[in-house]
Image (cartoon, helix red, strand yellow):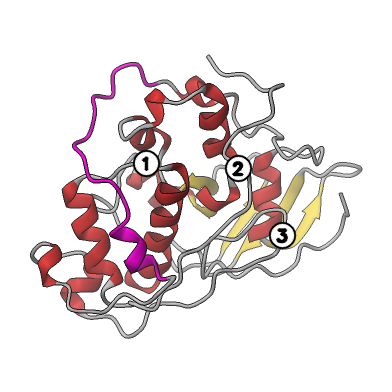
Amino acid sequence: MRRGRAPRARRTAVVLFAGALLATGGCKATDGDRASGRGGGAGDSTAEAGAGSALAAVGELTVKGRAPKTGYDRNKFGSAWADVDSNHCDTRNDVLKRDLEDVKYKEGTCVIATGTLTDDPYSGKSVTFTRGRSTIDIDHLVALSDAWQKGAQQWDPAKRIALANDPLNLLAVSAGPNRSKGEGDTATWLPPKAYRCTYVAGQVAVKKKYELWVTGAERDAMQRVLSACPDQKLPSGDAPTEAPSRFHAR
């Protein structure tokens, strides 16, 4: 892995990890209730969904009720931050390198020692990262417990490990807002308006890629947010949906 200053990575969309493909296009002018996820059901959306848009992809998601959380354990998704892409650096440090600026490494390693998260998606602030201090988290856009209740409990371990380490589903964010999100989906938690279109598009992309279902309330909230930015592109990522066989989960 090349050492040195990490390239600037705008968090206007979830990016491919191994490539540098950015799914760009922010929200258009927000429309109070729609962009905030308030109001009526999906029928309120009057925006036309363009080809390749996140809004169009919402209609392709399966809608079902949430399954019980029975049996969920983080270990079902493998050990945290496995090096599934075999680049000799764990997933957490890979994502920090992608999303932080002014990165400095622990000497002789790929471990990030310091860096800056500029324009944090969940707070809009600049957050300094220092290894060992709990200021920045790596968020799963689709929380693992949410995934468990919407299809992942039926998967082979290799697919769960892939989801937990897929850069499409990962984002460096400030710790406080992320911990208030918990296992929330689009219907129960949203970031500030400036980042909502990108955030929801990322969740839609992950659920579509891994064939996770959504609840009716979640589907409606996705449509309300994305109807304010109908041209928001659906992010993509080429990480495989199965981890290498050397990785195991309980």
Question: What is the magenta range?
Answer: 53-72
Q: Nearer the viewer, residue 17 or 103?
A: 17
* Tag 3 residue: 19
Disc 1 secondary structure class: loop
The nearer-to-camera label among 1 and 3 is: 1
Q: Position of residue 232 (x, y in %)?
A: 41, 74
**How many C-alpha atoms fall within 10 Å of the one at disc 3: few (<14), some, or many (≥20)?**
few
Query: How far apart are the two marked residues, 1 and 2, measured between alpha carbons?
Result: 33 Å
SS label for mark 3: loop
Residue labelled with disc 1: 212
191 in the magenta segment: no
Secondary structure under the numbered disc 2 in the rendered image:
loop
| Label pair 2/3, CB-CB below 8 angstroms | no
Q: CA distance from mark 1 to mark 3?
A: 24 Å
Q: Is residue 39 left or right of residue 60?
A: left
Q: Which residue occupies the extreme bottom position in the image?
A: 29
